[in-house]
Image: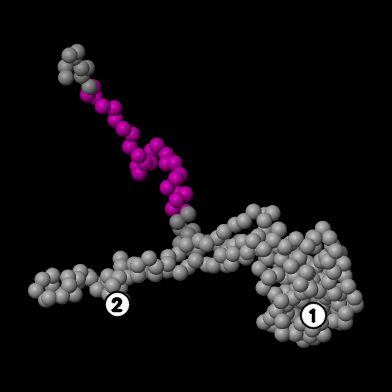
Amino acid sequence: MLEAPLFAASGKKQGGFALPGDYFDGTVNEPVMHQAVKVFLANQRQGTHATKTRRWVAGGNQKPWKQKGTGRARQGTTRAPHWPGGGVVFGPHPRDYTQDIPRKVRQLARRSAFNARAREGALAVVDGLDFSAPKTAKLAGLLESMGLAGKKVLLLTNGLRKNVYLSGRNIPTVEVLPFAEAATYNVLWSDTVVVERGALTGDAVADEHLPTPDVGPKVTEVPLKRTKRTPSAGAQKTVARAKKATKPRPDNDPKGPKPKKASAKKAAPKKKGAK
């Protein structure tokens, strides 16, 4: 069974801590770790690099000189790849570098990285990190008392600890992550891995004492009252004109529509066989 030194929150060494055997079983698979690191670094690439071929370089529409009679080699454009300022042959273009590996292979690589650090004696356990407020000096003093000043340290917390993260964000050689989010690359990048004890024992995440923001006096919302709008004079005239136009007129109204007279002529019936 692998053991790691146990430190108090003040940085004082308290003895040894037996690492859980179901995870720290001593398995170290280097080819799998190499594969996981390659995939991690490939997924960090944005793939936005781009070069211009001869079709995208501006200019070069006119021949540099005439085809014959100069004694020089024939040229068609100054944007050819062999000309200065011309296009680029086989240059990089935007592409996707994303790779993936099976989930069990990724888990094996992560477990192998932790076991490698534990076997090297580069893994330490801290009793608890209770930061009531972000304080870089407090975290730097803790690492100095543990003998890790100036080393690349990966600090893994029990769940998300905002104050611990903010405390270590300004230290260039310290990276703070939750234990469940640490990848194989993060473990192998560091010289020493410091794990919070609760992350290994499965204890519940302690609540952080975050200050309550001062939002000022409570403002009560007053519901808005709907007021009846009075239409303008022009709108009133338009409405009155529309009502007057739609009102039916009497039959004796001289302005009313005249009835259609029946046509006296009737269409002659078509004879059979007529076109």
Q: Residues within 10 Å of mark 1 (few under 14, many from 20)?
A: some
Q: Residue at position x 70%, y 70% from top?
A: 187
Q: Residues within 10 Å of mark 2 (few under 14, many from 20)?
A: few
Q: Residue at position x 82%, y 78% from top?
A: 131
Q: Nearer the viewer, residue 220 or 214?
A: 214
Q: Indicate the amino acid at tag 1.
A: Ala
**Residue 50 occupies quadrant:** bottom left
Judging from the image, what secondary structure is the residue with disc 1 in? loop
Vertical arrangement, residue 102 with respect to residue 170, above or below: above
Could you tell me residue 155's position as x and y percent?
Answer: 75, 74
Magenta residues, as a range?
240-266
Q: Nearer the viewer, residue 260 or 218?
A: 218
Residue 84 visible within the image? yes
Quadrant of the drawing holding the N terminus: bottom right
Which residue does the numbered mark 2 point to in the structure image?
84
Q: Are marks 2 and 1 in contact (CB under 8 Å)?
A: no
Majority secondary structure in the magenta region: loop
Image-based side of 135 in relation to 45, left or right: right
